Image (cartoon, rainbow, N blue to C red):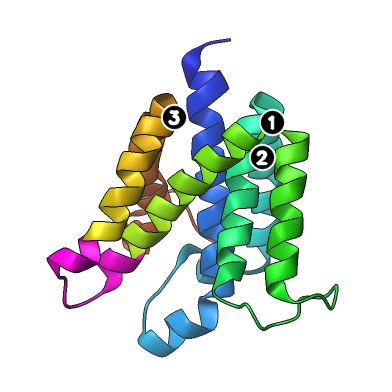
Amino acid sequence: MSWVAFNFLPVLGAGLVIKIMDDYLDQDIDRELGKKNWTQKAGRAAFPYALLILTLSLALNPPLSGTLFLAAYSLGMVWLPSEKPLNLWPAWLEIVFVIIISCYLFSWEGTLGSFLLIGTVDRLDNFLEKKKKTWSGAFFPILLFLAILIWDLPKALTGVIAYPLVLLILEVPYSRWKYFSL
C-alpha cells in the first residue's frame, strides 16, 4: 500500500471526523457568535458522514486513525472534567479509561504521538481563534509541535499536510461550493 493510502488518507479522514464532531458540538456557540460551520449546513447528515469517514479511515490504518480519534475524544473531555457523561463517571475517569483502551488496542507509542499531534492542533486552533495574539500564547503549540516532531516525525509531517486540507474542505465559504447543496 502506498504512503498516501496507508498514512495520509487515514490522518485526513480522522481529521475530518474530529472537525465534524467538534463543529457539531459547538453549533450553539457558533450560532451565538454568528459563525457558520459545515455541520449546520449538513444537519442530521453530519453524523452518518462522520461515521462513514471514520470507518474508511479505520479500514486503511486502524492504529493511526484509531489513536487520533481517541486522542481527540479524550482531549475534548479535558475541558469538561466535572461533567458526567452518559456512563455517569466523571469525565476525567472516562479520559483515563479511553487512554488505557487506546494503549491496549494500538500501542502506547502511537497513542502518545496522537495525543501530541491532536494537542498541537487543538492549542493552535485555540491560539488562532483569539483576537489578541501574544508570543506567550504561541509557546505551548510550538512546544507540542516540537515534541511530536521528535516523537513521531512521519505523523507530524502528515498532520502538517492534512490540517490545512481539513480546514479547506470543511470551512470553505458555502457560496464557493458549486456542487454541494443540502
| Separation of residues labelled 2 and 1 (CA atoms) | 5 Å
Judge whether 6 appears above or below 168 on screen: above
Identify the residue under disc 2: 66
Provide the secondary structure element on which disc 3 rests: loop
Closer to the camera in the image, 79 or 178: 79
Where's the C terminus, which quadrant? bottom right
Closer to the camera in the image, 67 or 136: 136
Provide the secondary structure element on which disc 1 rests: helix
Magenta segment range? 126-138
Under mark 2, the amino acid is: Gly
Closer to the camera in the image, 109 or 55: 109
Identify the residue under disc 3: 152
- Taking the image as drawn, is residue 164 in sight? no
Identify the residue under disc 1: 62
Q: In this rendering, would 159 be left or right of 143? A: right
Mark 3 nearby-residue class (10 Å; few <14, some 14–19, many ≥20)? some
Under mark 3, the amino acid is: Asp
Q: State the image quarter where residue 74 is shown.
A: bottom right
Q: Is residue 137 magenta?
A: yes
Under mark 1, the amino acid is: Pro
Q: In this rendering, would 64 be left or right of 38? A: right
Q: Which mark is residue 72?
A: none
Q: In this rendering, would 149 be left or right of 60? A: left
Q: Position of residue 12 (x, y in %)?
A: 49, 38
Do residues under tags 2 and 1 come within 8 Å of each other at their CB atoms? Answer: yes
Where's the N terminus, which quadrant? top right
